[in-house]
Image (spheres, coloured by chain):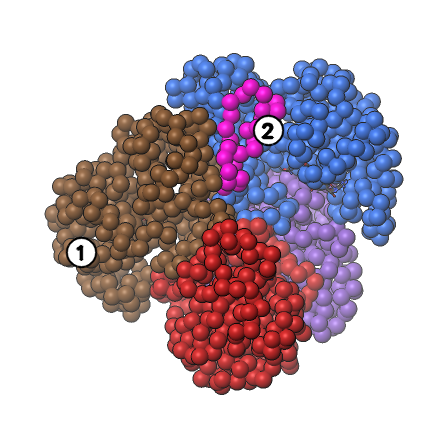
Chain colours: A blue, B purple, C brown, D red
């Protein structure tokens, strides 16, 4: 069993922990956290050994009556691999500690690409991660774009991608984040950094992205244009996207108009935390105009990277090939909504 | 096994169906719906026999490839009791059908009190429902207020309740509802109808309520003042509220500041649909000033009435007493967060 | 003086009334309304003769103590031209009445293109309206796109426009409109109807549009891609756009990040109703990648069509040419922020 | 003419500047700002001499091509009185500078009461400020509550006030503030600090307040209960409130359901910045139950303190009595909507 440590038990970290535990070949050796809030309490209830990420704060856990298993250093030492899910920027700072312990590490998309040896997407470049020390699972948006680009590139060839990312302002529990009533070009300067991030996975892809931030918390929504090198009809493209294991093509009769109903559907079918790991593509939106493909997809920012982290664990340790890992992960989680 | 039909399989109906199925003494004999959307699909996947609520629409289900078990009339005939969870106003119209079939029926809080023989809250007036033909499980807000009033009244006596209900504008999937950026006195005329609704449960209670509507979807929040007949200290009141089976007193160390984190916590502990059946009372807010008690509570509008519906099934059939039913319901659902 | 009637005194109608009054060659002969709310009261205070749009409702105005000048029929008869600013769909129904009175009429963008003889944008096709009976001032979004397309087409030639319209869910006072917390592909089917609407102004333009709706009320925001036929640099394009009389290029030092600050700026400089008649284009966003131009623009849905309506009055009556009318309108209003 | 300096030219400061300029007995000697954004530009356009609040930043203004008149020290020296409208906390730090220059100063409600010699509300305690060095114009919420309390106390006597303040999350241009989709008890501990702040104006008043924060930007809304010492009927109370010069009782026929329509009305009647200086009380909501008065009022956080600042200038300099100052201010501004 692969011993996996999770450093940073927040939005991403807690989901990765549960997904790792669900795998037949992995075990959660422990999780590290900085503050004794409701998430810490839940970690303990779930039986995850809890480690203090910052020594000075050990006392706070004591005060809250939450038992600790040790410090993050001990956790990293005990692990075969560490998944770092700390807030943006802190992951890069932690790399030195991981290297000192010779523990392979996965960073998240909040870190700069050059903080890691390689950037990772299971569908697109699994093998490049094997044998590296530090890999970065790309961000929720880049993951969503990569899953779309990969089959289109393989099947039809891509001239250029132009994508407008209408991003949620904050996650549902991030009460300090706005805007309350605005649509913010973000970043204002174009093209946005999201395109270059996709290039860490597809170095030769022509892609320009534009980002905005709006007062919504549930999912990002991508307005996508792909100029293809050939001219399949829309039905063919839809078939192709339906055949992918991590995309969900929303059927017209479901009457799903946005992220609210998508999450409601995920709740209804019993998904843990109502997570939607798949790209959600509106079937009705898939359209070809000449060689211009258009579509809308919604991306659940809190969870689409979770199966990717699981695969990246196997990739960095060289424990599996892409197809086998993806299948194992999917089956263990119950992918396919 | 009590055969329970659910007519109206939406926000409330689908939750009641799952809660009924979880009970040791009940079975879902079928659910009725009007439209073949994602909820209809999920009903079928869950193995609930699906009945057409409106004959004209049978074809629509056929078109969507969703199999029907019959019409709502057949469903009501086959049931020991029917839980009506149709949109406001339709429940009252359905009463005639239920009476024709001699099937005892539960309505929801969207119906006027006089559409039913009695209004129901498990904690406060379970027995009054036994033997009636039609009972009404009071609304989410009235349920939340009743659970608070009952122990306070018993323990300290109540001079008067004054409550401001800051209500969510719509449920998360109700994309057509506003406001987007406003705080609406609603209703404008005072006191609001919520007080008289509480009086259907506590006829002699002095209570004045004020309602507002705001751009939030997760939970209602109540700003509560109760003038007590005695002057316990805040710690005592907190103990009392912690001892109730359907209230959750939020501890300070959990660092939960609103509905977003409450729902996140519910997700993390694995609650189905992240439902919170309990009144959520901020421990830190419980305060006594003279004989004035103040506190904040959040009410999950989509689910607090669910355990009440389950109890009301037993109450109307005379199958149990209050304490036993509440305990059975709580245990089957996993009440107590 | 041109005698202008305004039928429908709501968001658009009241602004057109004030803009007409500000013109040296026009007079408001009266405004028609259906309900005696605060807007009716203000119309009277401003000295606009108020006509009842619906006879049955005359009594309501009496009850509210608001004096009427007559019925809409009398108003249309007295006018040289009528600006119809009724809710979508009603304008088309009114055309018969306007034709009966032989009064030239302007409809708004909520009406279908074929309800009118021609669609109008001052910058792009002023002359085509002269001599028609019924012209349609295109919608806020189409107006915003047309103002951008016209100079780019003239100066550089356009291969294709691809635009994602991130639309506000409702106007600030429309409390019944959502969504509260969602990003809705709207319409879901692609390309959206906005492109064909632009083609009513530029019949030969290649344009594909995608629309979304978000929980914001202040302005629409457009994420724009224009494939040009030549390759100017970004600074040149910026100069071109700065030289237009109805675009406002937001300078970096102003630190304006969205619609909130734009409206605040409009308030600060004393714009009536904080209206922004101009397309607001973020200077920093104007970018060329090869022959792909990218930029963000915000469109004040409530007011960008107002100067266009004023010009359309002159156009339909053949009272002026485009350049002269635009200059008169701009000067009277104080265009140029 | 009283020479008034404004230190901190933001939301409050720029409004106070315009209000001061509108007075017959005052002049704006200059305004001080820290950053060369759109507000700085507008200050210059309006002809307010602009001073640098922080020396290190002078260069930034130069870069933006915005001319400065000097530093804040010079400004304070030149003024008869300074209105400090810096962000919370900075005002208190500035007091030393004002004392050094012997320039009487007004702080805003974001400062602690003990940063000033006295707290000020024109209607309630004008005279107490005369002759002090530093007075604090109480916050928007406290101003709104004080205006309500004063006439009720005088006319009927007050047993106790209980108020729930449903507060906007941020001002319209504050895009960094949340929550996006939540209702936050804020502060969680009760009663909130707003009650004691009202006691700086009415030391003997029994008042308990509860605060919440919601995703809205336009106005605060207060849900009010006042236990009176006598039992007037609702119509009498309404008359009393209508007779006050800084309250606006919203009539039923206006069909105003919230802050969106209130601000729209203010726009329509041509209020500068659509400001509403008055407490906006829903007439229909004014209700007596026994000796319990209930009502809803909306408070425009950005502007209700503006006339109070103007009055406080006269009060601290001993230039007028309350009645005369209020009348002058009201007339100059056009109070009474
Ligand atoms: N939330 C998203 O939508 C999302 C999506 C994809 C990727 N990401 C990326 O994932 C990473 C984590 O983001 P998140 O949203 O889970 O953040 P989060 O704030 O929800 O969780 C971070 C956790 O790390 C803990 N932490 C803080 N400092 C720490 C330290 N020094 N050592 C150990 N733990 C520490 C915090 O207590 C918290 O539990 C970021 O790089 C982010 O960019 C986030
Ligand atoms: N949503 C809440 O927050 C909430 C809380 C407490 C009580 N309630 C009450 O519960 C009742 C149901 O509300 P909801 O929110 O679940 O509504 P909903 O709209 O989510 O669900 C209603 C369901 O009834 C179906 N339906 C419509 N017409 C029907 C008919 N004629 N026959 C059978 N089914 C029909 C609809 O297809 C839908 O599935 C209402 O009385 C409401 O006031 C709602
Ligand atoms: N609001 C916008 O953002 C916007 C932008 C551009 C174009 N438009 C278009 O302008 C038109 C008007 O929209 P609006 O937003 O001003 O609507 P609105 O609802 O604000 O105003 C419509 C007015 O018409 C009145 N009215 C209703 N029925 C009437 C009738 N039969 N006769 C006369 N008056 C009647 C109403 O009382 C109201 O005052 C629509 O076609 C709309 O699509 C609106
Ligand atoms: N905005 C409201 O709703 C509101 C309502 C009532 C009272 N207040 C109070 O008014 C005060 C000002 O609030 P605001 O909303 O106007 O803030 P703001 O942020 O809009 O404006 C503050 C201004 O002060 C400037 N500034 C910052 N540091 C400065 C310094 N050291 N010296 C001089 N200027 C400096 C900023 O550039 C800005 O222009 C606070 O005490 C606040 O609590 C605000």
Image: B173 above or below D163: above
Q: Are marks 2 and 1 in contact (CB under 8 Å)?
A: no
Specify the segment rendered in magenta: A185-212
Q: Chain of mark 2?
A: A
CA gap, disc 2 and disc 1: 57 Å
Query: Which residue is at the front of the view, B169 or C83?
Result: C83
Residue A197 forms part of the magenta stretch: yes
Q: Is residue A35 left or right of residue D146?
A: right
Q: Is residue D155 left or right of residue C293?
A: right
Could one spot residue A144 in this view of the protein?
no
Q: Give residue B122's position: percent from left, percent from top.
A: 67, 53
Q: Residue at x 22, y 44 (%)?
A: C323
Checking the image for residue A197, the label placed there is 2
Q: Which residue is mark 1?
A: C25
Image: A322 above or below C242: above
To which quarter of the image does residue B226 belong?
bottom right
Could one spot residue A62 in this view of the protein?
yes
Image quarter in which the N terminus of chain B is found: top right
Mark 2 residue crowding within 10 angstroms, few (<14) / some (14–19) / many (20+): many
């Amino acid at each position: 069993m692969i011993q996996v440590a999770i450093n940073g038990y927040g939005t991403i970290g807690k989901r990765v922990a549960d997904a790792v535990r669900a795998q037949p070949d992995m075990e959660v050796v422990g999780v590290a956290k900085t503050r004794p809030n409701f998430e810490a309490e839940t970690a303990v209830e779930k039986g995850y050994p809890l480690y203090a990420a910052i020594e000075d704060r050990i006392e706070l856990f004591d005060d809250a009556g939450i038992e600790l298993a040790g410090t993050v250093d001990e956790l990293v030492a005990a692990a075969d691999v560490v998944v770092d899910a700390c807030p943006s920027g802190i992951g890069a700072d932690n790399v030195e500690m991981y290297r000192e312990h010779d523990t392979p590490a996965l960073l998240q998309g909040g870190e700069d690409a050059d903080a890691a040896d390689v950037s990772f997407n299971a569908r697109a470049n699994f093998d490049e991660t094997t044998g590296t020390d530090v890999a970065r699972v790309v961000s929720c948006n880049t993951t969503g774009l990569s899953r779309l680009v990969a089959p289109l590139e393989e099947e039809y060839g891509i001239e250029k991608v132009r994508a407008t990312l209408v991003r949620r302002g904050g996650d549902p529990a991030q009460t300090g984040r706005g805007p309350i009533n605005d649509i913010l070009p973000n970043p204002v300067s174009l093209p946005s950094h999201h395109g270059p991030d996709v290039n860490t996975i597809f170095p030769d892809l022509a892609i320009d992205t534009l980002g905005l931030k709006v007062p919504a918390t549930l999912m990002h929504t991508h307005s996508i244009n792909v100029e293809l090198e050939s001219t399949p009809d829309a039905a063919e493209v839809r078939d192709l996207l339906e055949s992918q294991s991590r995309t969900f093509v929303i059927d017209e009769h479901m009457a799903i108009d946005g992220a609210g109903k998508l999450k409601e559907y995920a709740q209804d079918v019993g998904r843990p935390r109502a997570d939607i790991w798949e790209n959600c593509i509106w079937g009705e939106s898939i359209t070809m105009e000449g060689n211009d493909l258009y579509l809308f997809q919604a991306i659940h920012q809190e969870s689409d990277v979770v199966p990717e982290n699981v695969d990246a664990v196997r990739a960095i340790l060289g424990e599996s090939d892409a197809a086998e890992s993806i299948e194992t992960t999917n089956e263990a989680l119950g992918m396919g909504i």
